Image (tube, rainbow, N blue to C red):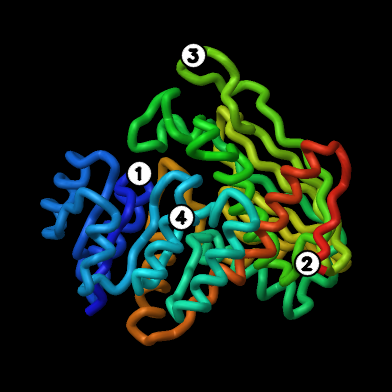
Amino acid sequence: MVNIGVIGCGKIAQVRHIPEYADNKDVKLTGFYDINLERTKEIAAKYNGIAYESVDELLANKDIDAVSICTANATHAELTIKALKAGKHVLCEKPMAINIEECEEMVKTSKETGKFLMIGQNQRFAKAHTVAKELIANGTVGKVITFHTSFGHGGPETWSVDPGKNTWFFDKKKAAMGAMADLGIHKTDALCYMTGAKVVSTSATLTTLDKKGADDKLIGVDDNAICVYTLSNGAIGTMTASWTYYGQEDNSTVFYCTKGILKVYDDPEHSVKFIHADGTVEYFEADQIQTNDNQTKSGIIDAWVECLVNNKAPEISGEEVLPSMRAVFASIESSEKKETVIIKENM
């Protein structure tokens, strides 16, 4: 039995982490902390755990083996490092941190303490992404030449545990980044996962086009990010992250390959579709992508618990996610400097 502590009891914790832990036979939900003490007490009572008034108190509980960090972006590194040094394994929500130095320090601390660090890049568990990865790896679709991948919806206002225009997602001090951190890291990481490649250069525009806060002024973080990525396998394409898709959510990827076109989550009827060069169409059934309105089990928690039970290092480790985080920060730099940024570490 693994004893788990949850730090941050907002929407992602309530929808994914906590119920998925509760559903796992190898887990005991032991402790909870949130800046909202009443919320902490309510959740602790519901799951028969302990409500802590501080992170330090929770981490001082020697019975807790591992923690989930489900707080605002700007606190991820500090809390993760503190938890690792307290002897806890850590599952940290995406984005890993708000700059590459923090990300690297998290990985370094994990190695120094001998404790696992896993990042919640749950799109690697989307079945269609796994199928696409296999089709690319085994040569079925040929070589990937170009691509476009998108993740867009109407914004985080309805997703936040405190919904509305005052959401922390719009607060630059707490979030640091907007759509790029919320959605762009997901698609960047999924792209690298499917292709088995890294982003080696980016030419990006991060901008705020429409989202307004409670003061009716444009928010201080990006609501759209459009990036032109070059991958280490030579493929070139676009990655778009947006909070201004005010209709149907889009979480699709299309690969244009030497043997045809591979479409992933592009067709509502078929999650993976390969259009051969001769025009014939082949379907590979997997699942339909989750949306904010249709949440199913992510796979992250069960994979994390399996690592803890078997003392096996997680595949989606902090170190594994570093190349995708470098692409995110390089895109921010590219947008600010209005020039292409080369990511030497990913070459």
Spatial CA distance of label 3 from label 1 is: 24 Å
Residue receiving disc 3: 215
Q: Is residue 261 visible?
A: no
Decide which of tag 2 and tag 1 comes sooner along the chain: 1
Labels 4 & 3 near each other (Cβ < 8 A): no
In the picture of the structure, the residue carrying the numbered disc 1 is 11
Q: Amino acid at mark 2?
A: Glu
Q: Earlier in the sequence, mark 3 or mark 1?
A: 1
For the residues marked 2 and 1, what is the alpha-carbon distance in whole angstroms?
Answer: 34 Å
Q: Which residue is at 25% across, 39% downward? A: 36
Tell which circle, 4 or 3, labels the residue nearer the N-terminal end: 4
Q: Nearer the viewer, residue 78 or 195?
A: 78
Provide the residue designation for mark 2: 345
Q: Which residue is mark 4?
A: 78
| Number of residues whose C-alpha sits closer than 10 Å to that of mark 4, classed few (under 14), some (14–19) or many (20 or more) | few
* Residue at 36% over, 79% down: 308
Identify which residue, 201 or 299, lies in the foreground. 201
> Which amino acid, mark 3?
Asp
Marks 2 and 4, how far apart at CA: 24 Å
Residue 98 as seen in the image, left or right of residue 295: right
Spatial CA span between label 4 and label 3: 30 Å
- Nearer-the-camera pick, 107 or 153: 107
**Residue 114: percent from the left, percent from the top?**
45, 81
Amino acid found under the numbered disc labelled 1: Lys
- Using the rendered image of the protein, determine whether residue 46 is visible from the camera's viewpoint: yes
